[in-house]
Image: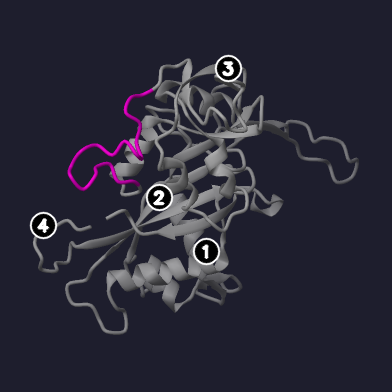
Amino acid sequence: MSDSNTGSQSPRQRTSRLLHLLTQTPMHVGAGFGPGAVDRPIQRERPTGFPVIPGPTLKGALAAAWLEAGASEGNPAGMQRDAQGRWLFGDNRPGQTAPSRLHVSEARLLAFPVRSARGGFAWVTCPLILRRYARDGGLAALKPDGTPNHDLLPRESPRDHQALFHRQGILALGDRIVLEDYTLFYREELPPQLPGALQSLLPADPVWTELSSRLVLVSDSLLSYLVQTACEVVQHAALDAGSGAVRAGSIYSQENVPAETMFYARIMAREEAEPRPAQGQARGALDLFRERMEKGGICQVGGDASTGHGLCSVAVKNPVA
């Protein structure tokens, strides 16, 4: 992928990968204190209400994989990026600033876990999310002959009382399923190649390997409603160290994205006009990034890291050609 249609290489040319994150534990990427019933809501897209991880938050979490113990000016006993991390994510040391080679987009929702009356839970997605994912290079929207690829994308959007799912699957109650408090009627089977294509994104995760039997496609408006009403809301309080009682004024409610939520983001690297041999090209930068991410296998995103929140399985894939 590049900003230029010519075959020659230019400083604006970019190469990209798709990063996928599956939350293993609840995740809180906060939007500050909210005016509603929840004191600390999560970040959401304004028009859709879908949960989102902002690019700066995600980039900082990813760059943490390149931290090493070391003193620096203004941080005599802290952590700093190693040499490879400074090349990939930039150098902000005094007098040695350098730009980031990697560009990280916001992480968008791909599949959201919802309670099911049968089978425990379902992974829910919608046509809007799949079209976005196709536009970002995750699915082939067109067949080689230029016709719409209905093997991966639905022909039409279901209505709010309908859903696409496996009629003989573990979630089905005859010709319907029940998600949260809503009964949805069978419209048709899922696009035949969609469950397998999504399941292959994270083949090493033992929970995600069940995706093909748990995938449900609902309308855009219903998913927007579900993600705004089916996230976890938990109460927090600070205790007085002496008495063990709850400290006055310390109680607040916090919204979390539930475990088993799948996000994706685009990771881009820009070519340099005259790259130095020691640095290599953008593709090399993305290969280094992919190697470190998949070697670790886990990334922590968001707040409450000390209590295990925000642990994510990670996988990096090439965009669909």
Q: Amino acid at mark 2?
A: Ala
Residue 64 picture location, percent across and down: 52, 64
Residue 135 picture location, percent across and down: 28, 43
Residue 213 or 113: which is nearer the viewer?
213
Question: Between tags 1 and 3, which lies in front?
Answer: 3
Horizontally, is 143 left or right of 262 in the view? left
Residue that mark 3 sits on: 182
Mark 1 or mark 3, earlier in chain: 1
Residue that mark 2 sits on: 265
Residue that mark 1 sits on: 64
Q: Amino acid at mark 4?
A: Asn
Horizontally, is 143 left or right of 130 in the view? left
Give the secondary structure at mark 2.
strand
Which numbered circle lies on residue 5? 4
For this orientation, the residue located farthest to the front is 168
Which residue is drawn at the image coordinates 13% and 58% (left, top)? 4
SS assignment for the magenta stretch, majority: loop
Residue 112 or 121: which is nearer the viewer?
121
For this orientation, the residue located farthest to the bottom is 277
Check if mark 2's residue and mark 4's residue have beta carbons within 8 Å: no
Looking at the figure, which quarter contains the N terminus? bottom left
Give the secondary structure at mark 1.
helix
